[in-house]
Amino acid sequence: MPSSLSVVLILLVAGLGSFYQLVVGPVIHAGGVFRKVYPLNNQNCRTVPELDGCEKIVHVPESGLLYLACSRISQRPYWLPAITHLNASGIPLDDHVATYDITTGKVTRLQVEDYPNASRGLYVHGMDVVPAASDPSLLYVYMVNHRVPLEGDPAVVGADSSIEIFSTKTGSSKLKHVATIDDPVIVTPNDVVGYPDGKSFYFTNDHAVKTGFYRQLELIFNLTSTSVGYCHTHDGCKIAADNLQGANGIAKSPTNDTIYVGSAHGAGIYVMDPQTDHTLILSDRISAGGIPMDNLSFDKNGALWAPLFPRGFEAVSRYKDFSIKAASSAWQFTTNIGPNSFYGEKYKAERVFEDDGGVIMGATTAVYLPDSRELFIHGISSPHLTICKV
């Protein structure tokens, strides 16, 4: 019979093996510590330096414009609540929404009007731009705003984030404030998808809490602790789906009501169906090989696009030190119509673009235009918009 020491050693080895397989291994894989970068379609590219530090790009086809939520990357080490940079002494003073004319290349910074909380600032993150149901030339802009709290040290209490709704006309340089939504359900908003009524939206909470050690545990142990919320300006907010892993970018299908949520912890894309009470039911999940991703977008052909972090630890490091290059990928996800669909591969995931950080640094958003075969890609820590033929 084995000795007591042998039994203890066997149990210890088994326990360490399980811990590595269930905890350490997935974190190393998601962080891309040993992942190689294979450049793809990153040679025929140009940049737009006027657009700096843009977290999100939204294409409004009817307008011929891209709408971008931008800041200055120099402020990221101070104020970026998504990764608990909460030093209000370095609060950004230049956050804004800009447009980029796809035909002429003109950049226009939109000026905010009738914003009653102007003294509290506008610190942009996720965004959606939606033509109104009654008038396609009227656009509703839904914006995550990471405000500084009115009381307390931000490093302790976190940001006092809200969702702002603005309106604008196609081609206008003005943003008119419509509503500010504050609610306890809006904890750590990252991205938002709006509806053409100008009143309702879904958003992601990328963490369960604003500050504290539990945020680290969420990543270390791959906790399913994040959520999607739903709000209506008249009816308030509610949790629509919870127990998600790293909920981040969110998008709505252009052809039906299906909601897609990307995971920043490598869990792929959650496919969710809205119910009559606006809760979301998980119907499927699309794999991205365990690689973290950020914002989602659809092209005119119905393909879903996402920027991925092949070496995620570089992206996190770059938020503090801009001398560090951060690799980026852009993937396209489509319904699989090939032979493999008969064997359960419902979706096709295709790597279309990849760069080691020499062309685009830490991409957080990607928009593809099939007609021109152009990929517009930017990042919250990138100094310029990058446009590549792919």
Image (cartoon, rainbow, N blue to C red):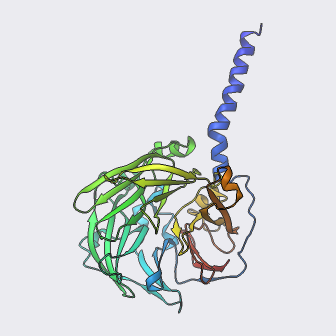
56 vs 269, nearest the viewer = 269
Q: Count all numbered tags in the image, as a single digit.
A: 0
| Picture residue at 40% right of the left edge, 55% below the top | 188
Residue 367 appears in the figure: yes
Q: Is residue 290 left or right of residue 367?
A: right
Image coordinates of residue 222 in percent, x first then y, are 55, 43
| Residue 176 position by quadrant | bottom left
Residue at left offset 54%, top offset 46%: 219
Seen from the viewer's position, the closer of residues 300 and 37 is 300
Task: Give coordinates of residue 61: x percent, y percent.
Answer: 47, 81
| Residue at the outermost right position | 1
Q: Is residue 352 left or right of residue 84?
A: right
Query: Quarter of the image containing the C terminus?
Result: bottom right
**Residue 324 seen by the camera:** no
Which quadrant of the view contains residue 375? bottom right
Residue visible at 50% across and 90% down? 106
Query: Which residue of the protein is positioned furthest toward the bottom in this rendering?
Result: 104
Q: Position of residue 16 (x, y in %)?
A: 68, 30
Percent x, y of residue 151: 28, 56
- Left or right: where 1 falls relative to 281: right
Q: Is the residue 51 above or below the residue 350 in the image?
A: below
Q: Quadrant of the N terminus?
A: top right
